[in-house]
């Protein structure tokens, strides 16, 4: 039976969010995965020549079968498939860029296990928003999937990813560090221990899970906050490292077991690398500008494609460029020298680079002191799950039209609105410099909100007031 990619994708109800095509596992049938794969290849062959495509997966129960369906589609097109098994998304992206071939990552990142997704990479990096539309509108014809092929793991991506970082530093760089690795179900959990040990660290592995754990680095759970403090004290840790499900967003804790905000980690990493110009989403902390460490900071919509698109402008004026997101994912937009060794650009989210650069920066100090040296602006983020995007859109429209009514509703009768930013969602700056940012998630039915203030407790309290007001 001959199928048309455009029709199959449209009927599935799956769309692209801020990080790949996302949907319920039940929507990602074998034919839907094949449709996306055929459409992706159709969009790539217009500008690139290749005979191979790489595939990797995360630890979700549904990921292996989705990878098999994608593989089947590629084989039907006469392409050789290199299957790297369970590795972090940046590991797959990095080795594929070096080999100049496209790749597909089967992952839903941090969203619940009943959902999954597909991330697509061109030979030169992440696909653009224009590429996404080309995939959705492709008219590739293919036969319905009838059987799924066996997959044999190639370990090249894992090896090259570890070498990317161990080659930059002395093998005793972390000799005095005791590091905890919160493994849970991260796609990179089998790589992180050998990587940190290769740099001399004493590694303690923590809480590996056989069940998928949807770690969200932007909205760390109360349970995970308590775990980090307990682990830090129990094992006398200098540092705790973890990631989201597909290993492209870091989650790191300081000497006391306090998880760092992702944008603060990114700021510290960029400074340690002497980056000149940054592209960051509008949701990131304003201390990035107020610290005066960078020649230029550009604000974008939320999502790595927008950050990467900004790189094209920045590279014309600056020799070293990078970006990061509030979730901690660090994107290296140009080749950089570290310890007189070149690290190649990797314009996709990565979790390992910011962690290592932070550790390199605190050899003679502490993470706490480094964080405290920055302008003291605190962001607290949260989300309301199972909150329909349509409902979120109505709320944002109401708040946009009547912001004072919203402020009164959450208990701010005496504050005024200084400015409103509509770059992505609704970002309100108040007369006392507090910031409230509301935004529907691009990956799941969730309403996300970010609160920034000059006191940590205040940002948390405002976030809780917003949560209560929308959940009544």
Image (tube, grey):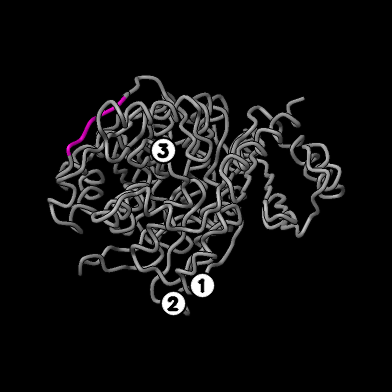
Of the numbered discs 1 and 3, the one sitting upstream in the chain is 3
Q: Is residue 306 above or below residue 67?
A: below
Single out the mark in the foreground, 1 or 3.
Answer: 3
User: In front here: 167 or 412?
Assistant: 412
Q: Secondary structure at mark 2?
A: loop
**Residue at x 63% of width, y 29% of height:** 385
**Magenta-drawn segment:** 202-206
Q: Are marks 2 and 1 in contact (CB under 8 Å)?
A: yes
Q: Residue tagged by mark 3?
A: 258
Give how far apart the Cα atoms at labels 3 and 2 are.
Answer: 34 Å
Q: Residue at x 12, y 51 (%)?
A: 171
Q: CA distance from mark 1 to mark 3?
A: 30 Å
- Residue 79 visible (yes or no): no
Q: Looking at the picture, how far across and down is residue 439, in whole percent?
A: 67, 44
Of labels 2 and 1, earlier in sequence is 1
Q: Quick check: can you spot residue 349?
A: yes
Does residue 239 appear to the left or right of 200 in the view shown? right
Mark 2, Cα crowd under 10 Å, few <14 / some 14-19 / many 20+, is some
Residue wearing tag 2: 318
Q: Which residue is mark 1?
A: 296
Main secondary structure found in the magenta portion: strand
Q: Are marks 3 and 2 in contact (CB under 8 Å)?
A: no
Residues at discs 1 and 3 in contact (Cβ within 8 Å): no
């Amino acid at each position: 039976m001959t199928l048309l990619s455009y029709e199959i994708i449209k009927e599935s109800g799956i769309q692209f969010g801020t990080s790949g095509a996302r949907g319920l596992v039940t929507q990602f049938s074998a034919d839907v995965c094949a449709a996306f794969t055929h459409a992706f290849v159709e969009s790539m062959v217009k500008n690139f020549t290749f005979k191979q495509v790489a595939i990797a997966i995360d630890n979700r129960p549904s990921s292996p079968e989705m990878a098999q369906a994608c593989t089947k589609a590629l084989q039907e097109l006469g392409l050789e498939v290199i299957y790297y098994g369970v590795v972090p998304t940046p590991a797959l992206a990095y080795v594929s860029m070096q080999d100049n071939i496209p790749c597909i990552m089967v992952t839903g990142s941090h969203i619940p296990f009943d959902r999954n997704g597909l991330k697509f990479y061109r030979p030169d990096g992440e696909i653009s928003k224009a590429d996404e539309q080309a995939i959705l509108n492709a008219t590739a014809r293919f036969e319905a999937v009838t059987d799924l092929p066996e997959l044999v793991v190639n370990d090249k991506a894992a090896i090259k990813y570890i070498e990317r970082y161990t080659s930059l530093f002395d093998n005793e760089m972390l000799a005095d560090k005791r590091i905890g690795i919160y493994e849970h179900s991260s796609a990179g959990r089998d790589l992180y221990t050998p990587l940190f040990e290769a740099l001399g660290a004493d590694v303690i592995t923590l809480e590996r899970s056989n069940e998928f754990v949807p770690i969200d680095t932007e909205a760390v759970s109360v349970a995970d906050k308590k775990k980090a403090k307990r682990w830090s004290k129990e094992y006398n840790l200098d540092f705790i490292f973890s990631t989201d499900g597909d290993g492209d967003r870091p989650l790191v804790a300081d000497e006391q077991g306090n998880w760092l905000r992702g944008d603060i980690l990114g700021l510290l990493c960029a400074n340690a690398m002497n980056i000149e110009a940054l592209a960051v989403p509008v949701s990131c902390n304003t201390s990035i500008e107020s610290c005066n460490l960078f020649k230029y900071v550009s604000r974008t919509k939320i999502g790595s494609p927008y950050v990467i698109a900004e790189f094209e402008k920045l590279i014309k004026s600056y020799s070293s460029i990078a970006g990061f997101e509030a979730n901690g994912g660090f994107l290296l937009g140009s080749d950089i020298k570290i310890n007189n060794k070149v690290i190649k650009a990797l314009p996709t989210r990565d979790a390992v680079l910011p962690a290592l650069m932070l550790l390199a920066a605190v050899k003679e100090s502490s993470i706490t002191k480094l964080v405290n040296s920055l302008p003291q602006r605190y962001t607290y983020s949260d989300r309301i799950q199972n909150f329909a995007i349509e409902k979120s859109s109505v709320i944002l429209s109401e708040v946009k039209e009547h912001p004072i009514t919203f402020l009164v509703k959450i208990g701010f009768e005496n504050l005024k609105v200084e400015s409103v930013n509509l770059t992505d969602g609704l970002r309100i700056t108040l007369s006392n410099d507090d910031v409230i940012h509301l935004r529907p998630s691009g990956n799941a039915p969730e309403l996300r909100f970010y609160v920034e203030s000059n006191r940590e407790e205040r940002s948390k309290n405002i976030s809780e007031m917003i949560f209560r007001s929308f959940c009544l």
